[in-house]
Every structure is written in structure tokens, then in C-alpha cells.
Image: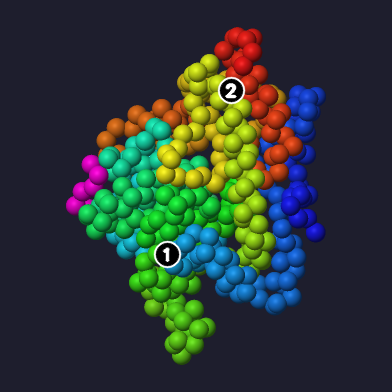
Amino acid sequence: MPQSSGARFQFDRRSVEDQNPAATARAAPVPFNRPSLVGRELDNIAEAIRRGQLSGDGHFTAECNAIIARLTGSASALLTHSGTAALEMAAILCDLKPGDEVILPSFTFVSTANAVVLRGATPVFVDIDPRTLNLDPSKVADAVGPRTRAIFAVHYAGFPADMDALAQIADAHGLLLVEDAAQALGSFYKGRPAGSLGDLGAFSFHETKNILSGEGGALTLNTPVLVDRARIIREKGTNRSQFIDGLVDKYTWVDLGSSYLPGELIAAFLHGQLERVDEVTRRRRQLFARYFQSFAALPSRHGIDLPRWSAEVQGNGHMFYLLLRSAAQRSAFIAAMREEGIGTPFHYVPLHSSPGGQRFGRSAGGMEHTDRTAERLVRLPMFFDLEDEIERVIDICLRVVRKLDGSGATC
Ligand SMILES: *Cc1c(COP(=O)(O)O)cnc(C)c1O
């Protein structure tokens, strides 16, 4: 069985990229992401089949819920089929209605905003702090109005947002505070784990995240009154879980809901990954540190910025990014890296300027830091098995940066 070696899946993406002869003339390409087996995923799937329950909420789902609650220091955790589903459940639990508003960053993935829009409520976009790329609490305070019901804070790149400042605003105005912790399993804020910092937290196990099951997610809950309702919402609006627990004698439709739970095969795979979370986080933090040290001279010599984070937070090595000098320099960088066979995608098209954001949301205040960040940011390859390739990625990055600057000078 593959253990820490992290055996690759059979459908290695290189086979696709190998069709590019320009890339194969050089060393093997390095994709942005490559999912690995890290533990007992395949044995667990066989065991789930032996146990005879493939629908959700069986043995492995219960085990995963317990591990996630422990890791995140949250009162309770429920597996979902995606991070998007966890955000949708959070929006239902916030009781959002048409006319209500939710404050969130424009610099995030669409699912943070869609969860709000699906309830008929309005996402109100607020600018980020240019140092942390997370919500700027002073701008959140300015954006609160009579219709505000909740704040959805994103922990970008696995570095938690300034949750004490946001909690203070939420408390002062009676708002719910939701963590979009999709990227933040294993991250800490003032020594407290992501997922324990708000009323609700949404995690993702998409194949690009640290811990993965292809598609997958979890909702963490720290407000006990919401737990029973969350279990009902997740089971199509029925009291099926109370029925299974023997708490009610009929199983029936009692509330709003949908099918938000994953099947047991996904939970079995995820369990194999979660058992190895310490090793996964340790490795990714090392890779992050390797990039960070290797690029230490980029800010002073090339005007390229590196990730910054406050001393109050500890990241989980989810992502390593560079902030190039301009949109034009970034396009040239991505093209030059692609020529070398290295995947360096950007992030995100800001939601306030996207067609969906303009149709469904509105901005509160200026968005200069969001715009400026979104046009400069590139993400570098980051995955469990990068160890053998990271030095080459770093060398190529430095060479490309020097070439773009037209200086052959040593870096
Ligand atoms: C990945 C991600 C999501 C969505 O998670 P899925 O599991 O892909 O649905 C939501 N928000 C953020 C910030 C993410 O990075």
C-alpha cells in the first residue's frame, strides 16, 4: 500500500502535457496541482464496500466528522459533498431572505457569493487588506447597514482573516460570522484552529486543497442551537438522522433542505487522507518555506512581492503565490512558465467586476486593493509530492523573472 511516498494516480496529468512537444523537449512538466494518495484511501474504500453501506452517514462519515471536529476545535462537524455545499448550508442556517445583505470579500471564489444569492440575498463586496489579502475589518465596519445579516470571511491561501476584529463587528450588530475556511484546514489564528473562529465554517476537500477526496467538504458548527437544524437541512429537510438515532418514531419532511451529504466511498477515501493530515501539513509548510526563502530577494531586486501574514496567524502551506509588478508582467510570466512546462495559474477575477457579481451583488467602498492584487497574483505549483521538483520550479522561476527584467544579472 502506498504510504508516505504518495503514490500517484494512474491518470497522471503529464500524459496530457506530454502531447506538447515543445515542453517534452525539456524536462518533465510540473503541473500546478497533482493529487496523491497519502495513506489508506484504497483499503478504506474496500472496507466501505465490505461494510455494505455506500450511501452517506455510515461508518467512515462518522469517523471523518469526529476527526474534523477535533482538528478544527469546533463543537460539531458534518461532511458535505463540497465546500460549495457547506457554504450553501451556512447561508440557509443564517436564515437569509430576499433583501438581506451579507458582507464578503470580492477577492474570493464564486461559491462564497453564490451561497448568498441562492437565498435571494445580496452579497456586498468589501475590499481586502493588501498585506493579508483577507477582509479589511475597518471597511467591513463601514459596510454594515440595517439589512446586513452576516459576514462571510475567507481565509485566503490558508492564512486566517483577522477574526477577533470581525467577531467584534458581528457581535456589535448581531450578525452571524461564517468562515469560508475552504483553504484553511490546519491553519491557526492566535493559537485557535480555523473552523473554531466563527459561528459556522465551510471546508473543502476538492482535489486542489491540502486534504482531498476529489470533490468534498465539511460544515463546522460552534453554535449549538444550529446543529439539529444543520442535520435536517443536510438530509433533504427531513428528520432522518433523529429517526436513525431513535429520537423520533417517524421520518418526515420538517424543514428546508437538500442532499448535501457525500456517499461512503468518498468518506472512506477522505478518511485515509485525514489520518495523515499532520504529515500533509508539515510537508506543505516546508515547501512554502522553501519557496519563501528562495525568493527572498525578489521584492528588493525585482519589485515582486511575496506572501505576507500577521504574527497572529499560522498558515497550513496551502498555496504559494507571487505578486508581480503589473498585469502585463504577469501575462508574460505565465506564458514563459508555460513554455517551460510549469503551471502557474492566476486567482481570482474579482467578483465585483464579474458579470455575476454585477448582476447579483454590489460593492461597498473602493476596490483598489482587490483589483491591484487580482491583476498581479500567480500561484506556483504546490502539492504533497512536489519535493523532487520544487528546486527546478524555483530555478526556472528565477530565470524567467531575470529574463523579463532584461537583466542577466545574478539573483
Ligand atoms: C475551493 C474553494 C471553495 C469551494 O470549494 P468546493 O469544494 O470546490 O466546492 C469555496 N471557497 C474558497 C475560498 C475555495 O478556495
Q: Is residue 406 left or right of residue 253?
A: right
Above/below status of 398 relative to 226: above
Above/below status of 409 relative to 84: above
Q: Residue at x 72, y 34 (%)?
A: 389
Would you say residue 255 is visible in this rendering? yes
User: 329 or 161: which is nearer to us?
Assistant: 161
- The kind of secondary structure element at disc 2 is helix
Badge 1 vs badge 2, beta-carbon distance below 8 Å? no
Above/below status of 349 relative to 169: above
Reply yes or no: does residue 158 show up in magenta.
Answer: no
Q: Residues within 10 Å of mark 1 (few under 14, many from 20)?
A: many
Q: CA distance from mark 1 to mark 2?
A: 42 Å
Q: Quadrant of the N terminus?
A: bottom right
- The kind of secondary structure element at disc 1 is strand
Q: Residue at x 34, y 55 (%)?
A: 177
Amino acid type shown at disc 1: Leu
Can you give x and y, in whole percent of width and height, for residue 239 in the image? 44, 79
The residue that mark 2 highlights is: 333
Q: Earlier in the sequence, mark 1 or mark 2?
A: 1
Can you give x and y, in whole percent of width and height, for residue 89 in the image? 43, 62
Q: Is residue 325 left or right of residue 209?
A: left
Q: Residues within 10 Å of mark 2 (few under 14, many from 20)?
A: many
What label sits on residue 112 in the rendered view? none
Q: Quadrant of the C terminus?
A: top right
Can you give x and y, in whole percent of width and height, for residue 210 in the image? 60, 49
Residue range of the region highlighted in magenta in the rendering: 141-147
The residue that mark 1 highlights is: 221
Q: Which picture quadrant has residue 139?
A: top left
Amino acid type shown at disc 2: Phe
User: Which residue appears farthest toward the left when viewing the image?
Assistant: 146
